[in-house]
Amino acid sequence: MDTAGDDLGRDGSRPRHPAVPGRRGAAPARRPWRDAPTRSSRLYGGTLKMDPVTLSLAVSLGLLVLLLGAGVHIGAALALVGIVGSYVFLGSWTAGLNLLLLHAVDISSSYTMMVIPLFILMGGIASASGITKDLFNLFYRSFGRLPGGVAVATVGTCAGMAAITGSSVATSAAMSRIALPELRRFGYDERMSTGAIATGGTLSIMIPPSITLVLYAIFAQQSVGKMLIAGVIPGLLLALGYILLIVIRCRINPRLGPPGPRFSFKERVELLPGVLPFLLVIAAVIAGILFGVWTPVESAAVAVLLVTAISALQGRLRFRQFVDACCEAVNMSASVFIVVIGSMVFSGFLALNGFSDMIAESILAMNLSPFALLLLLIAIYIVLGMFMEVSSLLALTIPLVMPIVLTVGWNPIWFGVVVVSLMEVAAVTPPVGLNLYAVKASVPSISLKTIYVGSVQFWLINILLILLLFAFPNIALILPNMQ
């Protein structure tokens, strides 16, 4: 993929190589549009000449800030910014409106995009079946006797629900109602308790079937199947890291989280029949994608059928709950589709005026080492994550960041795992961290500050995972490379 630009020269020829600074034999970057008679260069009857790239960017970014500040949906805001920016750059509405029409038709009729409503529907049906409580009881009876055992059971349940529902906010809200009463009964520190619930819920962002992984794959134009299975090992490592943090801290200071009661082997396994079928469905979905048995869309469809059948046969699912899950899937999917369409229009505008190439060239001109560049991107994402929710942050940044990733030579799948780990941090970072508010809404008596302070110790594990991925990239790539 040509990340530095593939513009035709004035004589119709192409540069021998992408115009990347420092590459031997690279042809000079050509920007014929800078001399083209665009609307920006004809302002005020030609008395004021401005760089069309600069003007279109200034207008579009100013409009984006205004729209987001006014509370406009991120998808609609990005689409409008892309259209207006294209108009300022070219002096015509045609290009921007064509981008909107083409991407709207393409996304709405995309076979790959069907995986989003199907995974959302599967999660809605599983949540309505009441599997969360059974899963928590299973982990509680199995690991409750450890130091901080009830909090360990909470994280384990969040990991299990991540593999079933794929919704971080829903998982945190459900665990606040189910686990927090038990955590309080055993006298757990509130920061430890709420931090485990809020951050444990973010495992749904990494562990498939994760809508966030699917969105990254679409925005970055990568394989959805490879992106989904790339999240398996890092997601499990994150869950293990959270658990080790709880056990170590509670062993050092038992007042943070004393051990729970012991249960007999019979009491532990008697809950398996209600939980195991759901976990087997998820294992079959991931294994099917990994070994090429079916595509992500086919696996999602099979999962919906199996989860619905299991829930109905176990007497967990009523017809009204099924209808509600379908309606929720339609509403959430429509919102996600608007974000994707808007992001594609915005990305098309950035490619049109060459800003993505300019960003990549500017970063390379800084001569940062790969590790320094990674630290810079981590800092940028943490700051932006304070003010934007996950899907909006991906939609806005991936079109800008991908040219840098490709130019530096990083694997896009590997980088996707890094970004998704940072999205988990964004989900528990105020003032917009939705998981914090999910816990707060379920337990109004606990302050938002307590929940956030309790979350910080956990999301530091995410940063450690990113550094581990930088040192050992195959942690994220070993499963995708098996396909």
Image (cartoon, rainbow, N blue to C red):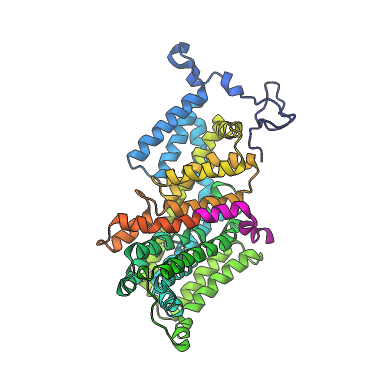
Measured from the top left, where is residue 129 in percent x and y? 40, 74
Residue at 33 percent of width and 42 percent of height: 71
Give 224 or 42, whichever is nearer the viewer.
224
Measured from the top left, where is residue 372 in percent x and y? 57, 41
Q: Is residue 234 left or right of residue 167?
A: right
Give 381 or 18, whichever is nearer the viewer.
381
Identify the residue at the far left of this view: 445
Q: Is residue 460 left or right of residue 6?
A: left
Give 371 or 440, whichever is nearer the viewer.
371
Measured from the top left, where is residue 272 in percent x and y? 48, 82
Compared to residue 243, the image places residue 31 above or below, namely above
Give 71 or 21, whichever is nearer the viewer.
21
Measured from the top left, where is residue 74 in percent x and y? 41, 44
Residue 314, picture quadrant: bottom left
Residue interval drawn in magenta: 463-482
Whether residue 367 appears in magenta in the rendering, the answer is: no
Identify the residue at the far front of this view: 252
Compared to residue 179, the image places residue 458 above or below, namely above
The secondary structure that most of the magenta stretch takes on is helix
Residue at 54 percent of width and 75 percent of height: 280
Quadrant occupied by the C terminus: bottom right
Residue 226, picture quadrant: bottom right
Whether residue 470 appears in magenta in the rendering, the answer is: yes
Q: How many marks?
A: 0
Observer able to see residue 148:
yes
Compared to residue 306, the image places residue 429 above or below, namely above
Quadrant occupied by the N terminus: top right
Residue at 37 percent of width and 59 percent of height: 454
Observer able to see residue 122:
no
